[in-house]
Image (spheres, rainbow, N blue to C red):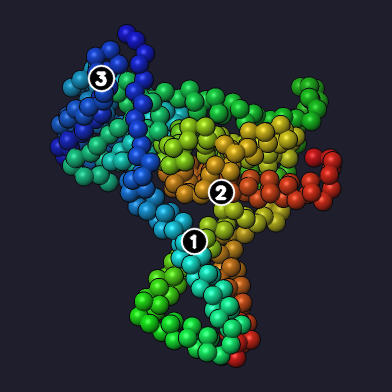
Amino acid sequence: MSERNVELEILRYDPDTDVAPHFQTYQVPCQEDWVVLDAVNYVKDELDRSLSYRWSCHMAVCGSCGMMIDGEPRLSCKTFMRDLSDKIRIEPLANFPIERDLVVVMDDFMDKLASVKPYLVAAEKRSVEDGSYLQSPAQLKKFKQYTLCINCTLCYAACPQYAHNEGFAGPAALALAHRYNLDSRDVGRAARQDVVASNEGIWECSFVGACSDVCPEHVDPAGAIQQTKIASTLDYFKDLITPGRDK
Amino acid sequence: MSRRPFVRTVSTTTWWLAQPRYIRYMAREVSCILIGAYSGLVVVGLLRLSQGAAAWTGFTDALQTPLSVGFHLLALAFALYHTTTWFNVTPKAMPLQFGEFQVPGSIIIAAHYAGWLIVSALFLFLSGV
């Protein structure tokens, strides 16, 4: 198997010693079938044990190895070295504070995710004896695409609205809210609307569409947000026509 | 070991130059200025029409200057860009599902183009072309 020498420029930041992040360069002998994560692992294992970054599954499931690779938010386990040049720039995901090296602070995203109640709010609790909540294949198909989100936050790193307004709920949280709103077993839409249909929810999105471009699971958060805008606008007109209607 | 997260700043004026997709987005947004200016021009035309034949002739003469032709070509280009980019994202905003069958996005987009052609043909017919 052929080998190629690649120069990795990695943004480093040590909160104990650095005033600001700086790039450090490593020469890595890459195999043809390597992904970027393999190259970063090589640096950690063979060249510099102080390098910090997140990863786990190495198969685009856990969503923890997101990085800016040549300026684009991507999963490093899903980005092949053979598709990149001999000089690669790797930075922590944009729009998040840097904790250390390639590790970012995700607290803001976790808070926003929790704020949209990303779980099933059932009309009535069923016991184990009652059996499962039933759903037809057609009902499942309405939202299945949005269940594929792995919370990798590449969409937040790509979103210029989130970059300029940290109050924005953001693509993944709003897509997850849409996923549960579309679920035939769920009755939590009204409770989610306070966050989802607020100024810092769907209405902060101006449909740049970058979130959907970079999503490694093709969830299409931008589409989810536009659909939620339409549903919320219909709510407004329905309320005008029939005030006090049952939601 | 201490926690001291580093916050990177993003330019509020040049951020859109960072990615080609941001530039395409800004082009779509900027199109509203040209479309707005063209709408204003149509209103001025109606006003001149209401002021009599001489005023109307003056208006149509002004439309034939190189500056006016250049503006119209630019406005047309941006209006086409605006229209096609929005048509192409309609399946995201308005997906159609019948039972388990999801209508392909290409059909939704094609329906918009067909509607555009029909309305344009109707306008051309009504204006006697």
Q: Are marks 1 and 2 on the same chain?
A: no
Q: Is residue A239 above or below residue A37?
A: below
The alpha-carbon separation of the residues under discs 2 and 3 comes to 40 Å
User: Could you tell me which quadrant the N terminus of chain A lies in?
Assistant: top left
Location of residue B64 (image quadrant):
bottom left
- Residue A223, label in figure: 2
Q: Give the x, y percent position of residue B25.
A: 43, 54
Q: Secondary structure at mark 1?
A: helix
Dot 1: few (<14), some (14–19), or many (≥20) neighbours within 10 Å? some
- Residue A156, label in figure: none
Q: Secondary structure at mark 2?
A: helix
Circles 1 and 2, Cβ within 8 Å, touching? The answer is no
Q: Which residue does the image show at 35% across and 80% down from the upper left?
A: B66
Q: Give the x, y percent position of residue A33.
A: 27, 39
Chain assignment, label 3: A
- Judge depth for marks 3 and 1 and give the one in front: 1
Q: Give the x, y percent position of residue A53.
A: 33, 24
Q: Is residue A8 above or below residue A142?
A: above
